[in-house]
Amino acid sequence: MPEASLSQEQRTVRDAGAVAVLGEPARRALYEYVAAQGRPVSRDEAATATGVKRATAAFHLDRLVESGLLEAGFARVSGRTGPGAGRTAKLYARSAREFAISLPPRRYEIAASVLAGALTERLRGGDPGATVASTAEQAGQRLAEGCPDLASALTGAGYEPRRGPGGEIQLANCPFHELVQRYPELVCSLNLHLLRGLLAGLDPAARPRLDPAPGRCCVTITRQP
């Protein structure tokens, strides 16, 4: 399944499965060796370095490729080309894919992107507050892209929507939990504008408002007639 089509929950499950692959000691040793080299490594080299039989090393290395932790390619280890250069070997290197596991879901990269934009604007002499608002709404619009409905967009962003007693949507999880503990006014404002952007393209009648309460996100969503 394409990365862009995965929800945050699906990414967490996928990443947890990939990291679980490292629970096997020999496999973990092979991964740590390959990752530490900073260059492609052959099966023979990895097996010798870790004391694992070559056939076992080949099995574990390919399993790491399947999990997305390593990438594989083919090249001549000798570096020579042409007749007599020898056969190509399968080489392994650490994957460029990033893995993140957080339960409940957190989305600190969104906050970092928005706040970096505000800082950049401040250095240019602009209004960082206005930049936080506009950048957060744009980020929310991007979160909504490709989502079939509001519930899936909110779930994909990590909010865990729940119906409140008055029919409003309460958000059981805050994707910026640790940041809110330190900078509540700034981060709750960012969150409000992020949700405004997310709602705009999916449900124009939905309105986010600040409504902090223990154990849930600071924003509640209501629908206007």
Image (cartoon, rainbow, N blue to C red):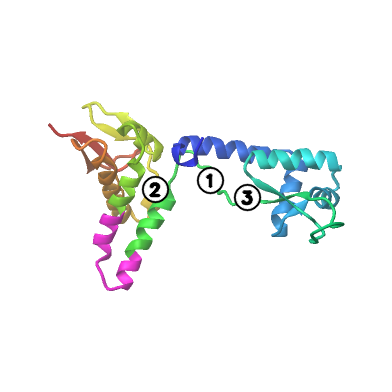
Name above or below for residue 13 compared with residue 87: above
- Judging by the rendered image, the residue that carries numbered circle 2 is 176
Towards the viewer: 75 or 110: 75
Write the residue at 87% across / 57% down.
Answer: 84
Towards the viewer: 1 or 119: 1
Of badges 1 and 3, the one in the foreground is 3
Residue 211 in the image: state x and y as whole percent.
24, 41
Residue 73 in the image: state x and y as whole percent.
70, 49
Name above or below for residue 37 compared with residue 195: below
Q: Give the secondary structure at mark 3.
A: loop
Amino acid on which the number 2 mark rests in the picture: Phe
Q: Check residue 85 for magenta coloring.
A: no
- Judging by the rendered image, the residue that carries numbered circle 1 is 100
**Can you say which quadrant of the picture contains the C terminus?**
top left
Few, some or many C-alpha atoms within 10 Å of disc 3 (few <14, some 14-19, many ≥20)? some
- Judging by the rendered image, the residue that carries numbered circle 3 is 95
Q: Check residue 125 for magenta coloring.
A: yes
Of badges 2 and 3, the one in the foreground is 3
Check contact, mark 2 vs mark 3: CB within 8 A. Answer: no
**Magenta region:** 119-135
Amino acid on which the number 3 mark rests in the picture: Ser
Q: In the shown orientation, is residue 187 left or right of residue 205?
A: right
Residue 21 in the image: state x and y as whole percent.
67, 38
